[in-house]
Image: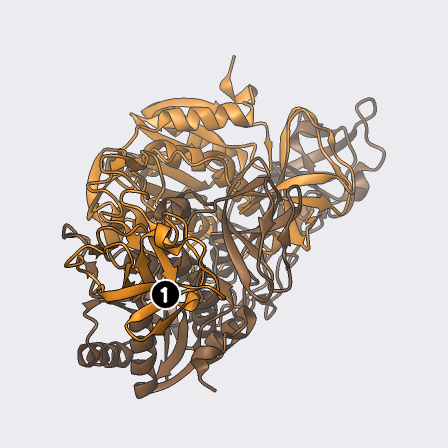
Chain colours: A orange, B brown
Amino acid sequence: MSLFLSVVPVGRAAEIAKNLAAPLPAERVPLDEALGRVLSADVASDIDIPGFTRSVMDGYAVRAGDTAGASEASPAMLTLTGRIRMGAAADHPVQPGECTYIPTGGVLPGGTDAVVMAENTEPFGGEILIKKPVADGENVIRYDEDFQKGETVLGKGRRLSAQDLGVLAAAGCAEVPVTKQPRIGILSTGNELVPVTATPKTGQVGDVNSFVVAAFIRDHGGISVPYGIVRDDRAAFSAALARAAGECDAVLISGGSSKDDRDMTADVIAGMGEVLVHGIAIAPGKPTVIGRAGTVPVIGLPGHPAATFVVLVAIVRHLIDGMTGNAAPDPVTVPAVLTTNVPSTKGREDFLRVALKDGMATPLFGKSGLLNTLARSDGVLRVPAASEGFEKGSRVEIILW
Amino acid sequence: MSLFLSVVPVGRAAEIAKNLAAPLPAERVPLDEALGRVLSADVASDIDIPGFTRSVMDGYAVRAGDTAGASEASPAMLTLTGRIRMGAAADHPVQPGECTYIPTGGVLPGGTDAVVMAENTEPFGGEILIKKPVADGENVIRYDEDFQKGETVLGKGRRLSAQDLGVLAAAGCAEVPVTKQPRIGILSTGNELVPVTATPKTGQVGDVNSFVVAAFIRDHGGISVPYGIVRDDRAAFSAALARAAGECDAVLISGGSSKDDRDMTADVIAGMGEVLVHGIAIAPGKPTVIGRAGTVPVIGLPGHPAATFVVLVAIVRHLIDGMTGNAAPDPVTVPAVLTTNVPSTKGREDFLRVALKDGMATPLFGKSGLLNTLARSDGVLRVPAASEGFEKGSRVEIILW
């Protein structure tokens, strides 16, 4: 049976895209360049964190037992023996009946096990009046309480956030093992396309999608490599695809919205490798092609801007994640209440652009060729293939763009 | 009254931070470098989009009236007069009783007003059988339906997404007017700090926060400029702050978690300009300083990692938005159901780290000096100052990190 006739379910197409992707090799990058990169291996801490028991308050390091029963009316009185300096250990241990001034972050001196907040104390000559008891361990972070030496602090497949860089810094990971960033070529096809810098004549349109695709790739941790506009000429197209496939880890073909273009895209991919999917049960975005040129994954995107974006979110994301090893769960969804009925055809996953406001989702029913509905939308409502749609007032989950 | 004694509400502190920020001047950047930048002016379309009425289907361009009443049993029969080529206008108009093959994206020829999908037709000699009627305008995007020439396509203050780049591309905006990226200096203070590449001795800790701060700045559209670690020495600190303030649009001071450090930070800022806030009614994050060195905004961040991150989200974000002119609404929140009671002190905004799973939010009650709870959290629950907390099972909004 011709692949052209068999439309593939979205989940299956995403799986095929992900399986086509070979995980990229690892490299080490300096910590300050690791934001948004994906860990290629578990990272364990080099050291115990913290490496010493430290105070989380400005106050007095004490033996908790010495403060038992202390109150405003009947404070405990401890002899002040000194002051902890930041960045250095105490010179001598604290004896029963004594205390030491300690700043936030200071090392607890030997003999002490808790810190009394300065607010709950009062100096009295060379003594300190303690007006509130503390429990053992109060107002301190104990040695290795955060992470233990050798413990995995962040796991393989984690896409690194700002907070994660802090964890790696604390773990002593100055160079981070990450997967290489996928280089993804973008080839625009279509005799109607002109560069954005040109003024389109009647019948021509600016090469809009390639900018959207490039930005999506960068947002998702890849490097976009532009190959410009190729005319609908089989030899020129084959040559451009061969070059892009030779230089990149994957190639996305943008444009080519007519059936002739799509057929040519599929034929050229087939001639250089294999077409695995030609048509997905998704709306918008049905005329998507997934295949490979040699071993390099190639996806032919639909021509309409909104359809392109839906396929980036539903399919291409999985290809990129497959290459980077990103183990992140599905994209963020937010619940919302539908403001209108949403009919849908069974057997096809519909991705409907919606605008979100105050927890209400309003579908933007514009044609998928319109950019303004895409720009006004905050995300998409996915209507599963088995569903005939949702009624007004339904609680639904919106995938944020 | 000493500023040190008066703790400022979070909303007021955020407003002060935003007002301190001078909006940065505009510059023009190539479209493919505009992702994440903020528009400095409204962008109007140079052209009508589309510039011609075009088909959104592969099929036949017709006069809708010619298809009235057509059905499987009784198709309309139209004479095929040719084929529209992509990227070019039709040679001749279509007369009543005629049709022309048109690919998706093709220019509707004169005389036609709708497109019949190829699936609803059948060739019959030189004629085309039309088996389903179409309405005027069906399966076409009309001239200027998306955007009209001179119409604002995206407004000043918009932070540009991948989709937005598509809209700008269509509007013929090859160079985009954006505000300059704020250069934000990061100065770390504290005698306990050592570079991440060093192995901390007892009492020392790696300079963790500066990595978190730098990544947050980059995530939010700024350029982070590292100034390294300065010892707790007033002259050295003043000199470093003067240099950073001279070279940057704002300065963040990281570390300095003890009261002595905080006082020195405030004193040094006061000596070079003014301290506007010394203490915010926020937990964690109370010991935050907001001021200016000359006219350059300076924020002294709290020392604990989780406190730093909360202050970045609650305060520093507004400073950056003030400089870029980002008009985006508050950060994305998702509703969730609390798995435990959350007590809170009235008069103070609590920001509680939470882990999200299947719509349930579990507070991570760890000390704000711990990194592992920060890394395990998906966002924060904000408990307003007027609230005494939330009960288990409450529906709350979580601010995603």
Side (left or right) of B36 relative to A367: left
Percent coordinates x, y for residue A136 in the rendering: 37, 47
Percent coordinates x, y for residue B113 in the rendering: 72, 48
Of all residues, the one furthest to the front in this rendering is A74
- Residue depicted at 63% across the width and 49% down the height: B396
Of all residues, the one furthest to the right in this rendering is B69
Towards the viewer: B233 or A187: B233
Side (left or right) of B313 relative to B9: left
- Residue depicted at 43% across the width and 65% down the height: A120
Percent coordinates x, y for residue B370 in the rendering: 36, 49
- Residue depicted at 59% across the width and 41% down the height: B340
Side (left or right) of B273 relative to A393: left
Whether residue B287 is visible here, answered yes or no, is: yes
Going by the numbered disc 1, the residue's amino acid type is Gly
Which residue position is annotated with label 1? B222
Q: In this view, does A60 lie above or below B369?
A: below
What crowding class fits label 1: few (fewer than 14 Cα within 10 Å), some (14-19), or many (20 or more)? many
- Residue depicted at 34% across the width and 68% down the height: A128
Of all residues, the one furthest to the top in this rendering is A1
Chain of the residue displaying label 1: B
What secondary structure is found at the residue carrying circle 1? loop
Number of disc labels: 1
Side (left or right) of A174 relative to B26: left
Towards the viewer: A386 or B365: B365
Whether residue B22 is visible here, answered yes or no, is: no
